[in-house]
């Protein structure tokens, strides 16, 4: 009997036996909550991508179709193929969004870096009031700022001789008005976490303040700079309200405005809307995947001994 019981205990366990020995109520509830959470995040994205390959009948049917019957590229051809019916010339809209989002991210990172470093390291009267005042600006909804901002830019354009409408450069300025306050606040708090002893040692060794910023502070602040850059890029890439007000020419439309135009077309084509939305989502996902290690890594760890 003993040998039989020992042989039963020492036999290799299969996957179900191992899972039964590992699972308990706490782990089960955690796995269930994680599954529900991931489903809420991933399923809408899957539905968007799969719907871009569906036919109109599959999308409009009463019974939901979770898997397309065929890999149809009609929606993508309508966006990019000049020979296709209802050609949308979507590549121009992608270029317009890039011409707005990339300069917005770069300028926001540069200006917020200079302002945040001055606020975090230099001592001047009213420093905290200035930082809090900048943050208060960000608390106002964008819809409240658009009318005075448009009126101010219109008066400036009349005096300087440029057009506010259909001007992507003006759109960059409006996005900077939204992104600079929070970028400045984020970088200021991050610069304060960098040990001041490192910069003081560099100044004693003969480095100028600019050399300290370029050689020491900026390399240590790479995670924060990338975070601010991705954040401002996402805002400019996805922004709808300001682009809807400032852009009237179809050749100047950014991606969100173009998607809205396709959605409101008299002959609705939801698969084309889903294809355009998929293309709009891909760059943001690529950015997060490409810079994930920088977003997670703390470069200041171990910068000062003891």
Image (cartoon, rainbow, N blue to C red):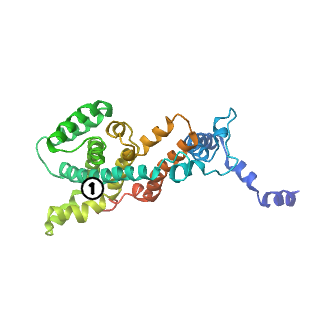
Quadrant location, the C terminus: bottom left
Label 1 sits on residue: 194
Which type of secondary structure does the marked residue at label 1 adopt?
loop
The residue drawn where x is 23% and y is 51% is 111
The residue drawn where x is 34% and y is 48% is 232
Quadrant location, the N terminus: bottom right
| Residue 107 position in % (x across, y down) | 27, 52
- Whether residue 201 is visible: no
- What crowding class fits label 1: few (fewer than 14 Cα within 10 Å), some (14-19), or many (20 or more)? many
Q: Is 148 positioned to the left or the right of 45 in the image?
A: left
Q: Is 271 positioned to the left or the right of 190 in the image?
A: right
Asked if residue 18 is positioned above or below residue 130 in the image, the reply reads below
Task: State the image quarter where residue 253 is shown.
Answer: top left
| Residue 294 position in % (x across, y down) | 40, 58
Q: Nearer the viewer, residue 281 or 285?
A: 281
Q: Nearer the viewer, residue 266 or 132?
A: 266
Q: Is 106 positioned to the left or the right of 60 in the image?
A: left
Q: Nearer the viewer, residue 243 or 297?
A: 243
């Amino acid at each position: 009997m003993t040998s039989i019981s020992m042989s039963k205990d020492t036999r290799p366990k299969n996957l179900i036996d191992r899972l039964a020995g590992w699972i308990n109520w706490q782990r089960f509830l955690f796995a269930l909550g994680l599954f529900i959470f991931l489903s809420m995040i991933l399923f809408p994205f899957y539905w968007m991508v799969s719907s871009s390959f569906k036919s109109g009948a599959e999308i409009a049917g009463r019974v939901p179709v979770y898997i397309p019957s065929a890999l149809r590229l009609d929606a993508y051809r309508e966006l990019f193929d000049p020979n296709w019916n209802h050609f949308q010339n979507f590549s121009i809209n992608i270029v317009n969004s890039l011409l707005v989002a990339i300069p917005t991210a770069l300028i926001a990172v540069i200006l917020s870096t200079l302002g945040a470093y001055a606020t975090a390291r230099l001592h001047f009267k009213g420093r905290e009031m200035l930082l809090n005042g900048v943050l208060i600006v960000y608390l106002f909804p964008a819809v409240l700022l658009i009318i005075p901002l448009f009126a101010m830019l219109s008066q400036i354009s009349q005096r300087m001789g440029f057009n506010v409408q259909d001007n992507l450069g003006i759109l960059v300025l409006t996005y900077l008005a939204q992104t600079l306050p929070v970028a400045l606040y984020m970088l200021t708090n991050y610069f304060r976490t960098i040990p001041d002893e490192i910069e003081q040692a560099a100044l004693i060794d003969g480095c100028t303040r600019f050399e300290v910023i370029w050689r020491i502070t900026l390399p240590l602040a790479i995670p924060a700079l990338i975070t601010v850059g991705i954040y401002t890029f996402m805002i400019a890439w996805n922004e709808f309200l300001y682009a809807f007000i400032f852009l009237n020419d179809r050749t100047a439309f950014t991606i969100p405005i173009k998607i809205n135009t396709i959605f409101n077309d008299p002959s609705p084509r939801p698969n084309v809307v889903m294809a355009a939305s998929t293309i709009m989502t891909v760059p943001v996902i690529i950015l997060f995947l490409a810079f994930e290690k920088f977003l997670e890594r703390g470069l200041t760890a171990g910068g000062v001994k003891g």
